[in-house]
Amino acid sequence: MVNPTRQFSVLLADDDPFIVALYRDRLLRLGRQVDAVQNGEDAIRRIQESPPDLLVLDLNMPRMDGTHVLKFIREQSKTPDLPVIVLSNACSQGVIDNVNQLRPTRFLIKFDVTPKDVLAEIQALLSEIESGNAIKPVPVKTKSANLSPPQIESEGPLLVQRFEEAVDIDTKREELLLLYRLLQADLRTLKGANLLAMPFQFGEALEQLFESAYAQPEALSLSTFETFRRMLAKLPTWVARAPEGAVTPEILLIHSADDALRCRIRELCTRPGFLPLQTARAASAEALLVENNLTRIIWHARRGSAVRKLMRLLKSVDHFQRIRTLLLVPDDEWPACQNQWSDNAFTVQSLPLQEAELLVNLYSLMA
Amino acid sequence: MTIDLEMLEDFFGDDHHEIRRVFDLFFNSAHLQIQRLHIGLDREDRDILNDAAHQLGGAASTCGLPALSEHLRKLESLSKTETMEMLDNAVKTSEVLVNEAKKEARVRLDWQSGEDAGW
């Protein structure tokens, strides 16, 4: 039987005074009785003296960590079912497994939730407690990739970050690499546009996935690509974060439907200050060109009609005069499209490629 | 934009006095954690580096500073493996980001409240 006059209490156990102050003040304003401790030992002492109705528990605390506090609580005859919200920074899968075995009522990762979410959970649980309802534990929901500690393995020529904490995605190598690059991006000087362009390197399937994700980010909120979406959502922030004086690489767009040719050219485009991006799809190349004001393009056209289409596209953009293009066309197609060119910003190389000539043209393009 | 003010307003309403007070707490806490990061570098103590980055990263996330939070998550993850030189750079970047957040908070909150933020 619940006493209607009783005030239900919350104990906050977190060693960060900022976190404690944030939630304590808010809960006090909501008329809750709140107490706070800053280490595990004090939490245990306080719980033994007078068990709260709800404990909000950080894991990483001095003198005794939150996992041990929770274990102690579950082993005590007075408090085996004490409702506990574990509120922690991202932690390893091993820690999550250990904590889950101790039946936390809720397990919230600070990185994944807003203060409003946390407050709502606290309020909801207190309401349940007040009404005397049984509270069903909800296992941890980890939406974000956890990089602690990183295990970087070499897989062919690529570096693949295998997250210690399971990220619920189909771990195609390209996807992992993409996530890895996106997560790495905060120490780089890439513009958001560069990052947005990155997926276009990894083939059509990922390209399409990226396009759909970017077009309808909300549709993926509960999907396996939550992490991916979160990273994309942060791109504008990253843009603002480039250090002062940082040089932003210029995108060098390589378009060819021929995978081998595209990759070979990309390998040759190693000049500092340029970010070579490749795409097999003309639509993607067009989008990149228009949205990012790209000025350096290597375009492989199999037929004269494709050259004409490219010309129309280039002339339609505002910065047409600044664009420098290296056009790769088959020998036998060139006569059919030669009269399409009216600007000297184009360099044409016939196929099959002569390596030396290609290098000269590439370096000229990147000069 | 470094600060997700919208997220904070979602929590506090449009009470910018309260938000400023929270930032005051956060920046005091950040100052201490940055000091700990430097202690970790001086002593080449990766545990201190890892812990300070972990603490500050969580607080930054809660305080609506996603850029700083992301950076510190990365620093935390790399603290056990990367060279001290690289970690030194990452700590410096953390300081820069904290200072940027301070500047932005001062401007945005002062501008909206007309009061002195105090930091």
Image (tube, coloured by chain):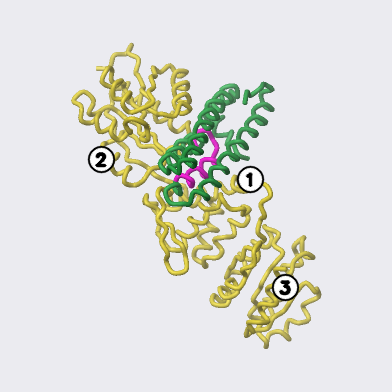
Chain colours: A yellow, B green
In the figure, A326 relative to B16: above or below? Answer: below
Q: Residues at marks 1 and 3, common chain?
A: yes
Residue at (48% x, 34% y) in the render: B59
Pinpoint residue A338: horizontal percent, then vertical percent: 76, 82
Describe residue A61's horizontal placement relative to residue A175 as left or right.
left
The amino acid pointed to by label 3 is: Ser
Describe residue A100's horizontal placement relative to residue B108 as left or right.
left
Pointer 1: what residue?
A240
Residue at (33% x, 11% y) in the render: A5
The amino acid pointed to by label 1 is: Ala
Pointer 3: what residue?
A364
Badge 2 density bin: few <14, some 14–19, many ≥20, Cα 10 Å: few
Disc 2 on helix, strand or loop?
Answer: helix
Pointer 2: what residue?
A101
In the figure, A354 relative to A177: above or below? Answer: below
Pinpoint residue B6: horizontal percent, then vertical percent: 58, 34
Badge 1 density bin: few <14, some 14–19, many ≥20, Cα 10 Å: some
Disc 1 on helix, strand or loop?
Answer: helix
The amino acid pointed to by label 2 is: Gln
Describe residue A294's horizontal placement relative to residue A155 as left or right.
right
Location of the N terminus of chain B by quadrant is: top right
Residue situated in front as seen by the camera: A276 or A273: A273
CB under 8 Å between callouts 3 and 2? no
Q: Is residue A228 magenta?
A: no
- Residue stretch in magenta: B61-76
Q: Is residue B63 magenta?
A: yes
